[in-house]
Amino acid sequence: MFIVVSGSIGAGKSTVTRIFSRITGFDPLFETVEGHPYLEKFYKNPREYAFRTQVYFLWDRFDKHYNTIKSGRDVVADRCLYEDNIFAKVQHIRGDMDDDDYLRAYLPHYKSLTELLGPPDLNVYLRANLDTLMTRVRKRDRDMEKDIDVDYMRTLLGAYEEWIEEYPYRKLIIDTNHLDLTCDLHPEWLYVCDAIKTKVTKETLPDIAEGISRLLGSLPKIHDLRDVKRATEEIFGTG
């Protein structure tokens, strides 16, 4: 089983990936941020480093996607190959990648690589508005993101929303604006995990779960962290 968690910068993908793996036993797979040879340079000088940054991400995501499928393991991943083009498209719109970079060099490779690999079993899209995203980015206080451009984030968010609406494969959209993503194991995350599991196994949830309250009715009630083990056993059959 291959599940990916997608969303704009600051949406909470790493948190959901980490917590879902802890609850379910899925192997977590994280985006390459530390050790990326161009990312920090890109934030300082996007026009010079946009193409190299995106090509590195493209092949890194392809490699991770390919090896996940080949392994046959249960994996939950922070971002996937299918959303790589969102960033490249934004760089093209902003003029940081010209037509040669984007249309002639990047895009044909992206299309070929996505055609070679099948889609993940489920794409979980974490929806958040611009104010929420900017607040989360500032809270995590990464040096390379401290001067991130609001206009860039606005354009990126718009591109993400267009992408998820057109995404043709199995997906679950969760509004995260009111979720506390700074807590490693908030009890409500069990509801998010149950929604993911239900979508994968039964297809009984709609594509859009607007707000966590939509998920609470038929799931185990959690009043404090002492109930986490019991709820986990009820949802996943394990403690």
Image (cartoon, helix red, strand yellow):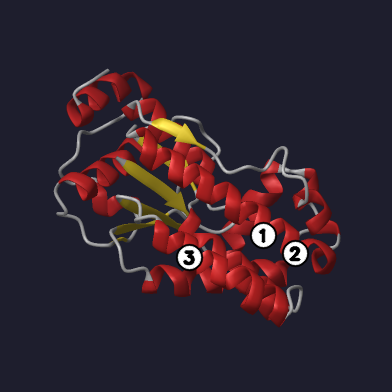
Label 3 residue SS: helix
Q: Which x, y percent locates residue 120?
A: 35, 51
Residue 218 seen anywhere in this rendered image of the structure: yes
In the rendered structure, which disc, 1 or 3, sits on the residue that comes first in sequence?
1
**Type of the residue with mark 2:** Ala
Label 2 residue SS: helix
Asked whether the beta carbons under mark 2 and mark 1 sit within 8 Å of each other, the answer is: yes
Structural crowding at the residue carrying mark 3, measured as other residues with C-alpha within 10 Å and reported as few (<14), some (14–19) or many (≥20)? few
Q: CA distance from mark 1 to mark 3?
A: 16 Å
Q: Which x, y percent locates residue 56?
A: 67, 53
Vertical arrangement, residue 77 with respect to residue 8, above or below: above
Q: Nearer the viewer, residue 24 or 109?
A: 109
Residue 180 seen anywhere in this rendered image of the structure: no
Q: What residue is shown at x 50% (from left), y 46% (from top)? A: 13
Q: Nearer the viewer, residue 51 or 43?
A: 51
Vertical arrangement, residue 73 with respect to residue 237, above or below: below
Q: Which residue is mark 1?
A: 54
Residue 50: mark = 2
